[in-house]
DNA sequence: TAAATAGTGTCTATAAGACATTATCTC
DNA sequence: GAGATAATGTCTTATAGACACTATTTA
């Protein structure tokens, strides 16, 4: 399976015959769906997992909370084919939060395209999840056309408050993140640049939904230090009692 | 997070005001992409992991192998919104193989929508993976418009032989399946109705890409028997030497 | 000194990896 | 009986879970 290289057909050779075909080709006018990207932007605020939502000012679902998102730019559909899905997600993220996409973890969750999920027309959305480090949250400014935006606590969300199928999308996005906690450094996107053992433990607890034993988690943590994923940082974190040592993720070369 | 129920807004209440809004609403004519479903249909033939591909008879990529797939039906875009993505995938699967979707494992892998992945026009595809039990493979008949179809060995595929970004899709589909081998009964979709320990072991070896130790795998297998996932079936599998006991997956209630 | 939280150690259960060994069939 | 594969057993190591314990700070 390693035989299959990732980015195929980057500079594909086009035969004269095929070039002629393409020159003559005119896309037929089948009915087409609208395609959007929606982003479940997560962060941790006040020790709670939260998601950034915008309140809809228009029908349908006027007054409900919705995920930030928007249409994928597809160009004129012939010469200019527009932007990639990831690019669209990154653009929307920046537009709606003011954050640079390079500072945020962004990954596709999947496509959601049930018929009638939008009563106006057929809309297929590509859902992404984004993780924002808590120390960047203060920089988030409610973007563009959004009437009202807020970080809502995930555990107290009610599906009735959410527009479209966004409750389902959020649920799937959380699941998506949760399954990757142990196999990726996804948690690094939800702690500040420096953090204590307990702070990272808390992130894991929130993402997995299970309480993490302090002693057992430390073992995991120490393994990450041994493997060079995490290193100690200068300084200490002052608390109400004994200060804690402070760590940081090692930048990958 | 459990607060979020899966299928939200099944019978949403629409206020008179919103109903009026929807009655007046006319979708604007933003440029829209074409949306297709493509299916990576896998099975095991002659002890090799194979994927069902069709040879393209037309430009672009004429002569290359491609995943079976087709356009998602989106209705007239207003009153009738067409079919769900899963429905589209199941329909295409049946059209192209003759298999009933209920007999086949089918799951979404994700959306692939890079600009210019199709030189004709902007096409976003929702990729699915399908797993066909080996005993159903003989029933597969090259479907509909497909000029030529064949089960190609995954490990000997070259990206150059594949149309569009289908090499990338296949790779991601294999990855998708591989990550679920240990946490789901996905392997049950790749063995015949009855199977031996070694046969299931071989499936795991192919899906994970790692050789599975006979003794160690048996332990795993016995755990599945204890958990009621697998049960012994009558009869034996005759081989060149000692016959092997035969098992089957317990039907879920 | 008391309260609080950081940090350490221990015991057990579970599962994986790497073998060696025995059992039972066909030819 | 020879060859082959099924089936079993053993030893080691890695990890997770539960929980008791010690250390260091603030108030």
Image (spheres, coloured by chain):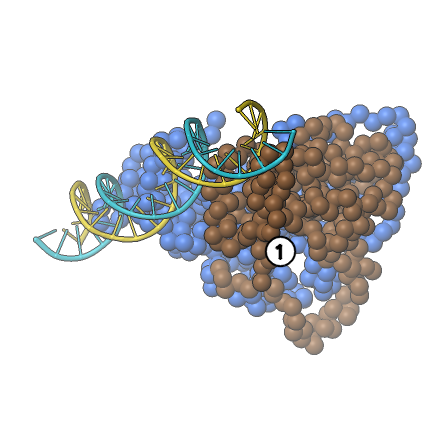
Chain colours: A brown, B blue, C yellow, D cyan
- Report crowding for label 1: few under 14, some 14 to 19, many 20 or more residues within 10 A (C-alpha): few
x and y percent of residue B175 in the render?
A: 52, 52
Q: Quadrant of the N terminus of chain B?
A: top right
Judging depth in this view, the residue of B83 and B125 nearest the camera is: B125
Judging depth in this view, the residue of D26 and A229 nearest the camera is: D26
Q: Chain of mark 1?
A: B
Give the number of callouts.
1
Image position of B194 (left or right of B141):
left
x and y percent of residue B193 in the render?
A: 40, 39
Q: Is residue B142 visible?
A: no
Q: Secondary structure at mark 1?
A: loop
Q: Residue at x 63, y 67 (%)?
A: A9
Q: Quadrant of residue A14?
A: bottom right
Q: Residue at x 67, y 30 (%)?
A: A155
x and y percent of residue B184 in the render?
A: 48, 39
Residue that label 1 marks: B145
Judging depth in this view, the residue of B226 and A173 nearest the camera is: A173
Image position of B196 (left or right of A46):
left
Q: Is residue A99 visible?
A: yes
Q: Residue at x 41, y 43 (%)?
A: B192
């Amino acid at each position: 399976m390693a035989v299959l290289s990732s980015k195929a057909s980057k500079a594909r050779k086009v035969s004269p015959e095929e070039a002629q075909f393409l020159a003559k080709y005119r896309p037929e006018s089948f009915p087409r769906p609208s395609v959007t990207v929606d982003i479940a932007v997560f962060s941790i605020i006040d020790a709670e997992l939260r998601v950034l939502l915008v309140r809809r000012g228009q029908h349908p679902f006027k007054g409900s909370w919705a995920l930030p998102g928007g249409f994928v730019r597809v160009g004129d559909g012939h010469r200019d084919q527009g932007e990639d899905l990831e690019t669209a997600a990154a653009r929307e993220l920046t537009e709606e939060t003011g954050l640079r996409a390079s500072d945020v973890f962004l990954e596709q969750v999947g496509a959601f395209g049930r018929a009638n999920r939008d009563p106006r027309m057929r809309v297929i959305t590509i859902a992404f999840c984004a993780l924002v480090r808590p120390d960047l949250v203060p920089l988030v400014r409610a973007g563009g056309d959004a009437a009202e935006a807020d970080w809502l606590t995930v555990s107290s969300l009610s599906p009735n408050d959410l527009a479209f199928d966004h409750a389902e999308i959020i649920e799937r996005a959380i699941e998506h993140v949760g399954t990757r906690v142990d196999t990726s450094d996804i948690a690094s996107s939800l702690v500040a640049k420096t953090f204590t053992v307990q702070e990272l433990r808390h992130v894991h607890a929130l993402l997995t939904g299970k309480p993490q034993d302090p002693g057992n988690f430390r073992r995991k943590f120490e393994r990450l230090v041994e493997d060079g994923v995490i290193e100690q940082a200068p300084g200490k974190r002052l608390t109400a009692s004994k200060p804690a040592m402070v760590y940081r993720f090692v930048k990958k070369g």
